[in-house]
Amino acid sequence: MTASPAAAQDRGGKFLTFYLADEEYGVEILKVQEIIGLQPITRVPRTPAFIRGVINLRGKVIPIMDLRERFGMASAAEALAGATEAEVAAAEAVRCIIVVEVVGPTGRAVPVGIVVDRVSEVSAIAGAEIEDAPSFGSGVRTEYLLGLGKSQGRVKLLLDIDRVLAADELGALTVEIDG
């Protein structure tokens, strides 16, 4: 499936890029509210495993999603098994939470924190440098991807952050937190 030239142009813009393991991802900068350091997360019972819990951010309760878990990757702790104490400390020092706004089931913006291994940079990627995600067959889900950005000789997986957390999951989570 190839996007029309107009659709490809619409996908271009500035993206905050970050790493999960050795892969670089990007999210539209206009969706980003802020970047904060890791802080204690309160677990909420009966939420999906990839929802780590909630934090209190200046008086507002924000759900926190672990993108590694959501994407079926090894946890950060598993990835660092066998690393030296200094390597673990260095990796933990750069892990952070990106607070993004996703469109909730009611159509209103809902802040959600996503835990990432490290933030990289803000990249301007033209629509012509973004390709559709390839089809890997019916068993591989790529609906989370806005496209693949080619920038500085690397491929960045550009996320459609509104689709990373499905509307029904987000609706259930916001009802539990707000209710």
Image: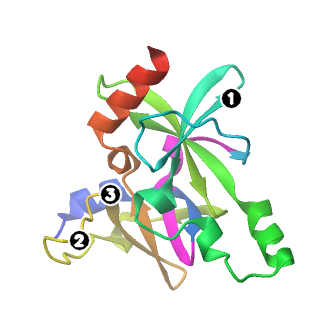
For disc 2, the marked residue is 140
Q: Residue at x 27, y 71 (%)?
A: 133
Task: Sort mark 2 into few (<14), some (14-19) or many (20+) by Cα contacts within 10 Å.
Answer: few
For disc 1, the marked residue is 57
Q: Is residue 26 magenta?
A: yes
Left or right: residue 120 compared with residue 64: right
Amino acid type at mark 3: Tyr
Real-space Cα distance between discs 1 and 3?
A: 26 Å
For the residues bearing labels 3 and 2, Cβ distance under 8 angstroms: no
Q: Could you tell me residue 161's position as x and y percent?
A: 40, 49
Q: Is residue 1 magenta?
A: no
In terms of secondary structure, what is the magenta stretch mainly?
strand
Q: Which residues are magenta?
A: 21-35
Residue 104 visible in the snapshot: no
Amino acid type at mark 2: Val
Which disc number belongs to residue 144?
3
